[in-house]
Image (cartoon, rainbow, N blue to C red):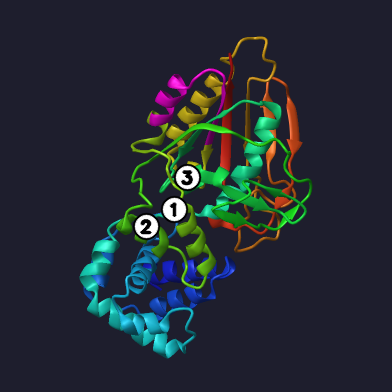
Amino acid sequence: MSALEAAFRHQADSCEALGSPFMGRLLRILAEDWPTDSALARFIASFGGNIGPAGHSLPLRICGGLHALVLTRRDADLIAAYPPADVADRDLRAAVLAAITAHGDFLIDWCKSPPQTNEVRRSAAMIAGARVAVSHFPLPLHLSELGASGGLNLMWDHYTLDIGKARFGPPVPALTLTPEWTGAPPPDAAPQIAARAGVDLNPLSPGDGEDMLRLTAFLWPDQPERLSMTRAAGSVMTAPLVKGDAIEWLSARLAAAPQGRLHLIQHSVAWQYFPAAAQSHGRALIEAAGPRPPRTVPSPGCRWRATATPPGARGRRWCCGCGRAISRSIWGARISTDAGSTGAIPADAAAGFCAAARRD
């Protein structure tokens, strides 16, 4: 088995475990019938190193390019074979292989860049976590996101979190998030965002047609609700985004953070991709920023993180673990509590937080 075939099959397993049977079918077709004599295949063969999800992620680049052909209505036969249609594997195979031949230049250009999504469902953890923070530090938020992509998760105060027994958010939200939630609900404390900004190596603008195409094409075709959520979130995105290195940007932003605000630093599945040295430096910057307030403030900073994958959850990682959604510790006060859990948000919807407080 070639490295590419193995990568296709591994990605197929992951997509099926995360609720996309169509992606499983598509990726297995590519594994079995990859057109090695095509221009796209020759381009893909030029990649070295890890070509799977932890590296170049070539299977998702290819699938994203095919989905882009559908979203831009460039290939009628491919459109007819994609959801919501449910065609036989032989018809899907024929449409996909024909599209790879007919649109080689488009697909090669598309695959030059890595996958980039902005999973809005991650904001469920953001909303809950921010409420935990402001329940202990009732200050306006100075919000910063590392690896912000299109900035959609910077706008979580425009979304409503509905956990069945309670709703949190504006009365007329841009979208409503409905994760499966167990345990205690988040606190009633309502965060107020005074300022927000984000950084990314390649920030995307949801208001730009080509950028929105990249954000949506990497969503899975048989999960239309994610497409709707992304477009809805894009309609309210106003946060400024900076192109650059996340930790360098964080250093400057921490130094310039105003007094009298809680500086909330968030990421939505970005931190784990930073080099170890960058993680160490970033953690040191955040921890150094925490103790800056006057000594009259007993709990100068806080941070919380997603817990680990629950035992037995094979083929699927979980946002915020199973049993503890938000595990929080307050620096200085030595307080540790849990704030409910959500076991229905998969790996592509996980989120992490850190926070440092400052006040006059």
* Residue 81 locus on image (x, y percent): 41, 83
Q: Is residue 122 visible?
A: yes
Q: Is residue 37 visible?
A: no
Are discs 2 and 1 less than 8 Å apart at CB? yes
Task: Identify which residue is drawn at 35% across, 42% down.
Answer: 201
* Residue 243 locus on image (x, y percent): 33, 39
Question: For the residues carrying marks 2 and 1, which lies nearer the camera in this image?
Answer: 1
Q: Which residue is mark 2?
A: 212
Pointer 3 local density, CA inside 10 Å: few below 14, some 14–19, many at least 20: some
Q: Earlier in the sequence, mark 3 or mark 2?
A: 2
* Residue 189 locus on image (x, y percent): 70, 35
Pointer 1 local density, CA inside 10 Å: few below 14, some 14–19, many at least 20: many
Q: Which residue is mark 1?
A: 234
Q: Which residue is mark 3?
A: 270
Residue 284 lies left or right of residue 324; in this view the side is left
- Image quadrant where residue 212 sits: bottom left
Q: Earlier in the sequence, mark 1 or mark 3?
A: 1
Q: Is residue 203 above or below residue 19?
A: above
In the image, what residue type sits under mark 2? Met
From mark 1 to mark 3, how far is it between C-alphas? Answer: 20 Å
User: Which stretch did the figure color magenta?
Assistant: 249-265
